[in-house]
Image (tube, rainbow, N blue to C red):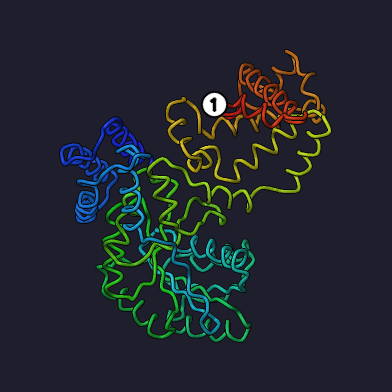
Amino acid sequence: MFDSLSTRLTSTVQKLRGQARLSEENIQETLREVRMALLEADVALPVVKDFIASVKEKALGQEVLTSLSPGQALIKIVNDELVHLMGDANESLTLAAQPPVVILIAGLQGAGKTTSIAKLSRFLTEKQKKSVAVVSCDVYRPAAIKQLQTLANEVGVAFIPSDTSQAPVDIANRAVEQAKSQFKDVLLVDTAGRLHVDENMMQEIIQLYQAIQPTETLFVVDSMSGQDAANSAKAFNEALPLTGVILTKTDGDARGGAALSVRHITGKPIKFLGTGEKTTALEPFHPDRIASRILGMGDVVSLVEEVEQKVDHEKAQKLAKKIKKGRSFNMVDLKSQLEQMMSMGGMAGIMDKIPGAAGMAKKAPGMGDDKSIHQMIAIINSMTPHERRFPDVIKNTRKRRIAAGSGTQVQDVNRLLKQHLQMKKMMKKFSKKGGMQRMMQGLKGGLPPGLG
């Protein structure tokens, strides 16, 4: 997400380096580039105009501090305005109301409402420690109710049955009573996809809202629809009092125009980003962290949170003890590290959050490409248990067998063995006294072996 915008803005700011002052002339030229970058990212025109005007007002005539270059001063201004544009701070769900807290999910057809309910259920259960029930009021789409039931079972939340012969308002009223009797903290209500121009369907969801009076009404929208996402959210907000937006499919959106337009056009906060197909792929929307990513400054806070949540700490401690004792780093250990990396969004997801690494990935072909990680895991899976523990035994005949078994070439197997050897040497240095310092010195100028 934001790849093209990030590249354009970073290169634009680079041009200001060496300037002693932010003058009207160099600011004007820079803002022209910024305007083009935002329009190419499919940000709505009114949003672009207001953003540029605000940056220009703050930047013109500003004295550059002795410790900052003009480029850094402009980055600070652009960063602050991006954060303000997207909503200043994360706005969490209101969960302090009388239980069950009812959350109504609305949106266009195919935006990912039902999947978002599963993700939100998991988030509320695991992160907020809430007991959750879900119900489907979608009586139009074939198998919609069955889909929600399957997802509810997958994430371990209560599913309240419904039937296509029932009226959506009746389903919702009964679900509220059932969630109350089961002492559930939260009830998530799925609705049928509808177009904002469909008067009958819009009237139905208004009646649904009036019947159950939800604490939260979230609009689910596909981020890949760009500024249309913001416009449809605005139309829905005029019919329903929305409390927030969930942007889905952000992992496939390289532009990011929707994220920059929604808050400005609707006045409603983006509360969550859907970052993939799995039920774990939902993250709270933090404008300050997103702004840092756009400007190539990374997102260390989110990276640390992901490590805390997704890394198997028991495995990590076992590996640390093993290395400390001087025992060899083998293919079993390497596979474990690669799998944990993939659980954190893969190489691209991690590098997106490391300051400066996103730019490094663009310069180095193949860096940040998760295909190579999947290939490495496939090669290791094609090895025998003995070969994984003792990679030194892998010679020509074994290499040909492993390559055939993993659908790769012998040179791919050789590359993996070489990368493993480099990592093994690095781990050995790490195990010795003063090893951390030596390892960090060895990393100057690049990433650890095997990560490129």
Q: Nearer the viewer, residue 124 or 327?
A: 327
**How many dots with numbers?**
1
Camera-nearest residue between 201 and 123? 123
- Residue furthest to the top in view is 396
Left or right: residue 377 compared with residue 56: right
Residue 406, position in %: x, y? 65, 27
Assess disc 1: are there few (<14), some (14-19) or many (≥20) residues with their C-alpha within 10 Å of its C-alpha: few
Q: Which residue is mark 1?
A: 446
Q: Quadrant of residue 268?
A: bottom left
Where is residue 377? Give x, y as percent: 65, 33
Extreme residue toward the left, this view:
25
Residue at 26 percent across and 68 percent down: it is: 235
Residue at the image point whose x is 66% and y is 22% from the top = 403
- Judged from this view, the residue extending furthest toward the front is 66
In the rendered image, which quarter contains the C terminus?
A: top right
Q: Is residue 309 above or below residue 449?
A: below
Asked if 77 appears above or below 405 in the picture, the reply is below
Give the vertical position of 120 relative to 360 (above or below): below
Q: Find numbered disc 1 in the image and state the secondary structure of the residue it sits on.
A: loop
Tell me: 48 left or right of 191. Answer: left
Residue 159 lies, in percent from the top left, at: 59, 72
Where residue 306 appears, as percent x and y from the top left, is: 58, 50
What amino acid type is highlighted by mark number 1?
Gly
Which image quadrant is residue 168 in?
Answer: bottom left
| Rendered-image quadrant of the N terminus | top left
In the picture, measured across the screen, residue 227 lies left or right of residue 140, that is: left
**Closest to the observer: 441 or 230?**
441
Q: Quadrant of residue 66?
A: top left
